[in-house]
């Protein structure tokens, strides 16, 4: 296959950046999209040009590193996949492909297609955990959990933190990401104790990072490579409202430390 | 006798006295403690945030130590433990199938082909049950049955169901649990997290590990970090083969720098070739994808009985299929350990019975399972793996058998550690895949997650205190000492050399070349002649690399090509050591198969009289053979026998 690539190049966080054209030829349809970029990069290095910087690691759709905006869609065409799981057989010979980084103010660009997603880490640090120390936990089967809740918690917990939900959203909202963690933990008895405190802290952090609000367009759910459901946003909103009314930090209501 | 220089000193693993089952409890009762007030005065550096590093960082911070954690990824949540699929073993005996600490211990020693340390493996089995408790308490959503209790599956090399799992994403769920625990301590100030930082050297002061030199990958700034102890949890080195199931960034650099500073590297040639991976499709391929071993619970492996059979797999009738694992190993069938399954696949393909375009693949067939359980049940168990397979190959495994072939997956070798998980360099601890300690010559499935979390949650937190008890009055370690000056200069000089050698070739060119040699000469089967040739060729690659590699841009910026170059430079040196180790070991055991040493049936032939030792190598310089130190392995509780899965 022969293709025309238009790729966002930006030297550093303060550089303005621009789209640059790169024709590329002899691409096999069996290559993954990132392998196609590897080929381009080796050609650039051989010419003495800087290769295109992009985040990637596991290349099997689970680490959440890769994050390209391809032809106007996070992770490109196809549903339920990350960029590294996209194969060139999804394109046609002669296609023009636009490749850009995630675009959201809370994800500043570091270089080319690489962004800083540490805002997600800070949302988890605000409360995305159960307060238990290593040491002497109770026997695992001492806490039976009904299968339906357990499965639903698992579905929420499959989020890979890639940020496609934010990139897809016209408001750059992080509600799908945040709600997935809120849902995962509050559906389990171990996590219910801190549920109120958690939802308030995480939503607060999300707002402080500058993520926008949710206007229910549902774009995040469509683009999520793991199929995380909008229902989690609804659950988080309910919990947030309940907690905002009844949670009293002074009395330690809702548990916590 | 080894053909390499050998030190007469036998390495002392400092295994506690007493009966096997009491060693760990007694040891814990007698190691020195550091009081809560003193822990505040002690700093610990942890490199790597996979299961071992993240669990250690969280645990030490909870105890009150000041932890500084480093990862090269943009978030600790992305460490490669995330990609582990199948499960985690624990001797819970929830299934009432007679499982026990002893059985898990025994299976692991046997699975490792009698090349691991009894005391360490017993401890691993002993703490395994607590890991599951800890993870459930953190909210890890393991699979459950309709009664709300935890479910188990079976894995290769064992006859009980002791594997806990979270669909095909167990590693992800366990890592997110450890990452959550870490995040909590980051928020509380117990951990200072350094994302996108790569350790480029360890700093020794008066012979003790007292800090690291790290590069901020965003800015290229070289930083000095000091601590009272340094913990490496930096993972395995499978990417020395270029193609492996490891993440693209997985590397040996942290461990290799420690090796160059005196830490012994143990059993480097023990690498695990996983039997069920998606076959290579062409030269463009950048990595290989694992299909979880759990698939062998219900999938059946076969090749056609006729060579070059042109028919589609579904058109080949039952009696013209060779279910070669079931034929050769009736007791374990498709669930033989990984090394055995991999070699059997290679044997069939080398004999001309391979399938697919490359003829280097065998079938993994689910049609019987679908008939037996229905497509829905199969989908519930393995759906995400089937989806992953279809995305990559464009074939539907519900309709046609998967094509699989072995691929490099895990490295049992690593930095040598004693019973306390400390290397021979004082104050340098090594956890998880980065150390060599528990898996011998072959790791059983679902044991890597167990070991990583055992080391981080339940072993290091106790053993490190025994070392740090001497440091309660030391005070902060200064970073302006001559040792830090020298280490920083060395790192900067090396980067300068890489950036300014005026070469023309990209890093991948060398990495692929190295990988090809390693796969052909030091992969699934090895022989003395091939290994000798490989060492010569690898040394030539090293010289060419340092003359002709080209890295555009500068070292003072985000520069991924420079990151790769540093890692590949270390892989090249490691490759030579792996071949040396494989050449030294004149026997076959586990994943190390020397063609000269096999039984008439083609099984691995061990030599317990001469090779029941850990080969721990001391660095002597690039291109110079390393010096061999031996740790003799003593089996007091298990009789060494020829492994049989028939």
Image (tube, rainbow, N blue to C red):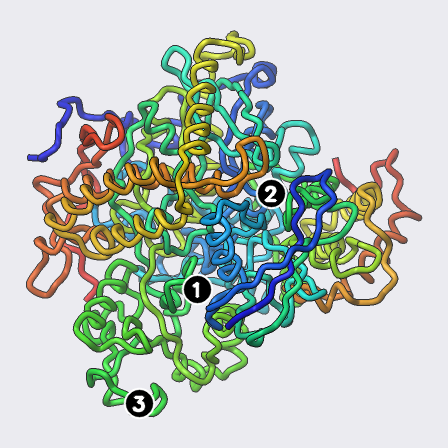
Considering the numbered disc 3 on the image, is that residue within a helix, a strand or a loop? Answer: loop
Q: Is residue B576 left or right of residue A32?
A: left
Residue B195 visible in the picture: yes
Q: Residue at x 61, y 32 (%)?
A: B219
Q: Residue at x 21, y 45 (%)?
A: B537
- Is the residue B568 above or below the residue B265 in the image? below
Q: Identify the residue position indicated by label 2 in the image.
A: B74
Lower position in the chain sequence, tag 3 or tag 2:
2
Q: Quadrant of the N terminus of chain B?
A: top left
Q: Chain of mark 3?
A: B
Lower position in the chain sequence, tag 2 or tag 1:
2
Considering the numbered disc 2 on the image, is that residue within a helix, a strand or a loop? Answer: loop
As measured in the structure, the alpha-carbon distance from the residue carrying label 2 to the one carrying label 1 is 34 Å
Q: Identify the residue position indicated by label 3 in the image.
A: B311
As measured in the structure, the alpha-carbon distance from the residue carrying label 1 to the one carrying label 3 is 34 Å
Q: Identify the residue position indicated by label 1 in the image.
A: B153
Q: Chain of mark 2?
A: B
Task: Decide which of B247, A207 is in the foreground and name it.
Answer: B247
Q: Chain of mark 1?
A: B
Task: Decide which of B424, B407 is in the foreground and name it.
Answer: B407
Mark nearest the camera among 1 and 3 is 3
Where does residue A204 sit, x and y in percent of width and height? 84, 43
Task: Decide which of A257, A34 is in the foreground and name it.
Answer: A34
Lower position in the chain sequence, tag 1 or tag 3:
1
Residue B54 visible in the picture: no
Considering the numbered disc 1 on the image, is that residue within a helix, a strand or a loop? Answer: loop
**Marks 1,3: beta carbons within 8 A:** no
- Name the image quarter holding residue B207: top left
Mark nearest the camera among 2 and 1 is 2
Labels 3 and 2 within one chain: yes
- Is the residue A98 above or below the residue A251 in the image? below
Q: Residue at x 48, y 39 (%)?
A: B563
């Amino acid at each position: 296959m022969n293709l025309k690539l238009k790729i966002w190049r930006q030297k550093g966080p303060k550089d303005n950046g621009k789209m640059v054209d790169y024709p590329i030829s002899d691409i096999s349809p069996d290559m993954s999209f990132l392998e196609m970029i590897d080929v381009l990069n080796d050609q650039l290095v051989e010419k003495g040009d800087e290769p295109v910087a992009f985040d990637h690691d596991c290349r099997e759709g689970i680490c959440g590193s890769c994050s390209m905006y391809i032809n106007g869609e996070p992770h490109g065409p196809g549903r339920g996949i990350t960029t590294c799981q996209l194969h060139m057989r999804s394109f046609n010979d002669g296609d023009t492909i636009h490749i850009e980084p995630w675009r959201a103010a809370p994800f500043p660009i570091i270089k080319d297609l690489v962004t800083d997603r540490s805002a997600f880490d800070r949302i988890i640090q605000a409360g995305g955990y159960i307060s238990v120390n290593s040491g002497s936990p109770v026997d695992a089967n001492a806490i039976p959990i009904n299968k339906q809740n357990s499965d639903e918690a698992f579905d929420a917990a499959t989020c890979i933190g890639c940020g496609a939900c934010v990139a897809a959203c016209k408001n750059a909202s992080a509600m799908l990401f945040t709600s997935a963690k809120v849902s995962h933990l509050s559906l389990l008895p171990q996590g219910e104790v801190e549920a109120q405190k958690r939802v308030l802290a995480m939503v607060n952090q999300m707002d402080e990072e500058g993520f926008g609000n949710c206007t229910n367009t549902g774009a995040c759910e469509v683009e999520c490579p793991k199929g995380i459901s909008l229902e989690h946003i609804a659950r988080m909103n309910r919990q947030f409202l309940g907690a905002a009314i009844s949670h009293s930090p002074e009395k330690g209501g809702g548990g916590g430390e | 006798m080894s053909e390499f220089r050998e030190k007469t000193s036998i390495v002392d693993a400092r295994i506690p006295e007493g009966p096997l089952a009491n060693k760990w409890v007694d040891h814990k009762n007698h190691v020195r403690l550091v009081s809560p007030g003193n822990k505040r005065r002690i700093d610990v550096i942890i490199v790597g945030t996979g299961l071992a590093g993240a669990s250690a960082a969280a645990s030490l911070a909870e105890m009150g130590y000041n932890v500084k954690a480093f990862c090269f990824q943009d978030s600790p949540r992305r460490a490669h433990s995330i990609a582990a699929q199948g499960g985690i073993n624990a001797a819970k005996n929830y299934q009432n199938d007679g499982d026990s600490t002893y059985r898990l211990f025994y299976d692991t020693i046997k699975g490792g082909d009698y090349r691991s340390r009894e005391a360490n493996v017993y401890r691993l089995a002993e703490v395994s049950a607590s890991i599951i408790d800890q993870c459930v308490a953190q909210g890890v959503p393991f699979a459950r049955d309709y009664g709300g209790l935890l479910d188990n599956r079976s894995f290769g090399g064992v006859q009980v169901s002791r594997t806990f799992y979270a669909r095909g994403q167990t590693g992800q769920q366990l890592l997110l649990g450890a990452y959550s625990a870490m995040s909590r301590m980051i928020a509380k100030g117990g951990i200072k997290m350094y994302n996108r930082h790569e350790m480029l050297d360890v700093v020794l002061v008066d012979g003790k590990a007292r800090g690291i030199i790290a590069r901020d990958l965003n800015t290229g700034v070289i930083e000095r970090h000091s601590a009272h102890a340094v913990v490496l949890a930096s993972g395995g080195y499978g990417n020395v083969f270029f193609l492996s199931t490891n993440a693209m960034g997985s590397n040996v650099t942290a461990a290799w720098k420690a090796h160059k500073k005196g830490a012994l590297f143990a059993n480097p040639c023990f690498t695990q070739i996983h039997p069920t991976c998606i076959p290579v499709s062409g030269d463009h391929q950048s990595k290989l994808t694992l299909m979880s071993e759990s698939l062998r619970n219900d999938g059946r492996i076969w090749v056609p009985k006729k060579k070059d059979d042109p028919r589609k797999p579904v058109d080949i009738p039952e009696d013209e299929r060779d279910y070669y694992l079931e034929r050769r190993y009736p007791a374990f069938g498709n669930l033989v350990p990984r090394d055995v399954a991999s070699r059997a696949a290679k044997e069939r393909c080398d004999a001309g019975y391979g399938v697919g375009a490359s003829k280097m693949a065998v079938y993994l067939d689910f049609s019987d399972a679908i008939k037996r359980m229905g497509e829905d049940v199969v989908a519930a168990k393995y759906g995400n793996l089937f989806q992953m397979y279809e995305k990559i190959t464009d074939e539907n495994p519900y309709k046609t058998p998967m094509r699989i072939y072995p691929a490099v997956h895990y490295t049992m070798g690593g930095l040598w550690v004693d019973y306390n998980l400390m290397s021979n360099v004082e104050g340098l601890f090594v956890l998880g895949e980065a150390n060599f300690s528990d898996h011998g010559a072959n790791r059983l499935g679902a044991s890597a997650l167990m070991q990583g979390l055992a080391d981080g949650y339940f072993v290091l937190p106790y053993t490190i205190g025994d070392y740090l008890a001497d440091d309660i009055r030391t005070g902060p370690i200064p970073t302006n000492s001559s040792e830090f000056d020298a280490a920083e200069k060395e790192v900067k000089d090396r980067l300068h050399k890489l950036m300014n050698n005026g070469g023309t070739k990209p890093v991948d060119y060398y990495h692929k070349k190295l990988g090809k040699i390693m796969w052909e000469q030091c992969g699934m089967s090895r022989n003395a002649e091939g290994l000798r040739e490989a060492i010569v060729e690898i040394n030539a690659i090293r010289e060419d690399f340092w003359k002709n590699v080209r890295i555009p841009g500068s070292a003072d910026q985000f520069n991924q090509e420079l990151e790769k170059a540093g890692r590949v430079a270390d892989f090249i040196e490691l490759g030579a050591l792996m071949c040396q180790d494989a050449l030294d070991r004149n026997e076959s055991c586990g994943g190390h198969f020397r063609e000269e040493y096999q039984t008439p049936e083609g099984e691995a032939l061990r030599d317990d009289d001469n090779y029941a030792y850990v080969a721990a190598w001391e660095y002597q310089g690039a291109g110079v053979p390393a010096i061999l130190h031996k740790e003799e392995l003593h089996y007091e509780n298990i009789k060494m026998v020829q492994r049989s899965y028939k």
